[in-house]
Image (cartoon, grey):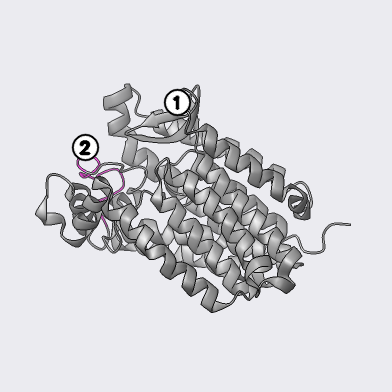
């Protein structure tokens, strides 16, 4: 059973990666030629990320995943250190007012992606060690929430609210499944609402995103432009699409066509059939991932796989929701499909860890 689950997860992921590779080239080739004089610019970079992600995925599959338990605290400490360093001018790279990246020649590294993985590993290890105390506030509930809080503050300083919200939801799912009191979770959510309100409505671009989500036609050439162009792309595709490579919205109409809004280009070029196909593949990935969670050989593997599956499925749901104008713009890529650099690499690492956990009983 475990072997079949691993094969199914790998097969679905491989298909999604293949679709993503084709669509990244289709969505970015004209833009890449205009900006860099090379229509294959983003495709070549994506293939390099695929190579790096594959090597790291094979590496994390090469040893018993239980060894991550020894690294949980050091990884958490390293993640916090990197999140501090990226905020320092001259070390972190600032793009459009956000300081989220380290730049190494042609490769950019986003430490918030590493931090998300580190928090999930830390939380899984903590629950496995302190599961008997998880219903208590001080010894069971508070420590992982404090780790989340420290990480969230540093990521918000970049600023990146979307990643913080996704990570918080995943953490709460893990704690709820572990048996944390619902009253603690609800109280924490209610206590965070005023801060969330301030974070959204005190920052002009976030407030503009909410207003554009509610009514993009109030400012069709400004804040509502991206939402409207995404709707046009999805609507233009009809049932069967306009044909692979024939998108008009990628011709400098839809911003971030190969990253955050690649799903809209899929809808335009491959139509409703293409978008439903992608959604079915993601649902299949989550379904097989759920089987893997249920068959995890120990408590640590159970909660680690739960956290990783929750994060991947949540990012997919948010990205598709944004593309379809069901959710406000968040800036989260579509796992295994979007051009995303470090985000794509860590999705591959997460896949490697999941495949490792699925190797139930294969270690001596």
Q: Please tell me whether mark 1 sits on a helix, a strand or a loop.
A: loop
* Quarter that holds the C terminus: bottom right
Q: CB atoms at circles 1 and 2 under 8 Å apart?
A: no
Q: For residue 252, which numbered disc appears in the image?
A: 2
Mark toward the start of the polypeptide (1 vs 2) = 1
Q: Nearer the viewer, residue 106 or 184?
A: 184
- Examine the rendered structure and indicate whether residue 226 appears above or below residue 193: above
| Left or right for 82, reference 202 | right
User: Magenta stretch containing residue 233, yes or no?
Assistant: no
Which residues fall within the magenta stretch? Answer: 241-253
What secondary structure is the magenta-colored segment mainly? loop
| Mark 1 lies on residue | 89
- Residue 92: image location, x then y, percent: 47, 29
| Left or right for 318, reference 324 | right
Distance in Å between CA atoms under marks 1 and 2: 32 Å
Q: Residues within 10 Å of mark 2 (few under 14, many from 20)?
A: few
Q: Residue at x 62, y 67 (%)?
A: 141
Q: Residues within 10 Å of mark 1 (few under 14, many from 20)?
A: few
Q: Nearer the viewer, residue 204 or 5?
A: 204
- Residue 276: image location, x then y, percent: 37, 64
User: Farthest residue toward the front?
Assistant: 138
- Residue 9: image location, x then y, percent: 60, 60
């Amino acid at each position: 059973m475990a072997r079949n689950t691993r094969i199914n997860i790998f097969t679905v992921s491989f298909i999604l990666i293949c679709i993503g590779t084709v669509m990244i080239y289709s969505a970015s080739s004209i833009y890449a030629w205009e900006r860099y004089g090379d229509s294959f610019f983003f495709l070549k970079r994506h293939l390099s990320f695929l190579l790096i992600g594959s090597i790291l995925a094979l590496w994390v599959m090469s040893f018993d995943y239980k060894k991550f338990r020894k690294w949980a605290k050091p990884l958490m400490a390293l993640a916090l250190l990197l999140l501090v360093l990226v905020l320092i001018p001259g070390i972190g790279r600032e793009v459009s007012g956000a300081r989220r990246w380290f730049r190494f020649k042609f490769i950019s590294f986003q430490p918030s992606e590493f931090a998300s993985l580190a928090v999930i590993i830390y939380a899984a290890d903590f629950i496995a060690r302190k599961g008997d105390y998880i219903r208590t506030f001080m010894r069971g509930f508070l420590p992982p929430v404090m780790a989340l809080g420290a990480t969230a503050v540093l990521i918000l300083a970049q600023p990146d609210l979307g990643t913080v919200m996704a990570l918080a939801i995943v953490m709460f799912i893990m704690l709820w499944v572990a048996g944390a009191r619902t009253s603690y979770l609800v109280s924490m959510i209610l206590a965070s609402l005023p801060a969330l309100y301030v974070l959204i409505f005190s920052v002009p671009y976030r407030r503009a995103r909410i207003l554009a989500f509610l009514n993009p036609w109030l400012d069709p050439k400004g804040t509502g432009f991206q939402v409207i162009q995404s709707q046009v792309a999805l609507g233009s595709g009809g049932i069967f699409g306009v044909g692979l490579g024939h998108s008009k919205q990628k011709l400098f109409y839809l911003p971030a066509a190969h990253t955050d809004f690649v799903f809209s280009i899929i809808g335009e070029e491959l139509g409703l059939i293409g978008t439903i196909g992608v959604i079915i593949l993601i649902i299949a990935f989550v379904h097989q991932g759920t089987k893997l969670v249920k068959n995890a050989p120990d408590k640590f593997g159970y909660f680690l796989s739960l956290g990783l599956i929750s994060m991947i499925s949540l990012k997919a749901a948010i990205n598709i929701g944004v593309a379809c104008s069901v959710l406000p713009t968040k800036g989260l890529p579509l796992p295994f499909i979007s051009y995303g650099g470090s985000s794509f690499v860590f999705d591959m690492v997460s896949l490697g860890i999941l495949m490792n956990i699925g190797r139930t009983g294969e270690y001596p």
